[in-house]
Amino acid sequence: QLVESGGGVVQPGRSLKLSCAASGFTFSDYGIHWVRQAPGKGLEWMAHISYDGSKENYADSVKGRFTISRDTSRNTLFLQMTSLRTEDTAVYYCVRAVGFRDLTLDYWGQGTLVIVSS
Amino acid sequence: DIQMTQSPTSLSASVGDRVTITCRASQTIGSFLNWYQQKPGIAPRLLIYAASSLLSGVPSRFSGSGSGTDFTLTISGLQPEDSATYFCQQSYNHPATFGRGTKVDI
């Protein structure tokens, strides 16, 4: 199970930190992604962190603004979002990664809604 | 980045129909193609991975095929609960990229 939290309404330019609590599997064995979905739109990959936290990847649209991290002792994934823009408004999902290059997304959280608005 | 082009954008079909959704990659991706189902207000669910492998628990009326750049998702014998949006995603290279989705109405 993956349970996201931390979403809410935030003003443009401000910061927000999302959390994703994992249970039911060995968290330290899996890479995890953040994927977002703007209202009524498709799926957009945001960031990925490897099973041991040694590698991170980011979408160009958030590189330098968002930071993915993980705390294995707490079985928790984080997404620190800074300099938020209105176009960052979306439901943010954390998703477990499996397979070749960690690019198959097999279990999804329920999502947390971030609204960036003044 | 690898672009994924999915068609059609939407379709309407009847219970029992056979439905086909196509997905094309902008470069060859072997069989590194996944399909997801998303119902309104619910997170996506992985249906098919590696182009044609059904995830455990997914009804056998779902099938996937293709390799290289062209892929299809087929639903044989459409059921009311299949009303959803379906997304393809390439799992060949970072970043993961998705098709824009196909909304299936019944």
Image: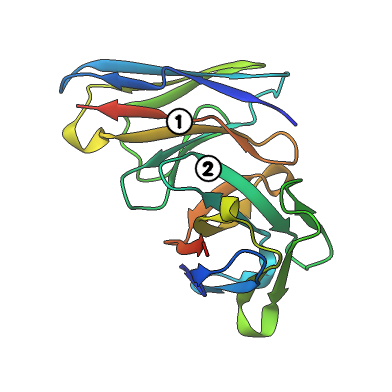
Front in this rendered view, residue B77 or A45: A45
Quadrant assignment, res A68: bottom right
Q: Amino acid at mark 1?
A: Gly
Q: Is residue A31 above or below residue B57?
A: below
Question: Would you place residue B92 above or below residue A106 in this image?
Answer: above
Circles 2, 1 touching at the beta carbon (< 8 Å)? yes
The x, y position of residue A40, in whole percent, is: 40, 42
Left or right side of A49 for A91: left
Q: Residue at x 73, y 64 (%)?
A: A51
* Residue B76 versus residue A111 in the image, above or below: above
**A46 over B64 or under it: above or below:** below
Task: Give residue A30's position: percent from left, percent from top.
Answer: 66, 62
Residue appearing at x 65%, y 46% in the figure: A99
Tag 2, which chain?
Answer: A
Residue carrying label 1: B101
Amino acid at circle 2: Leu
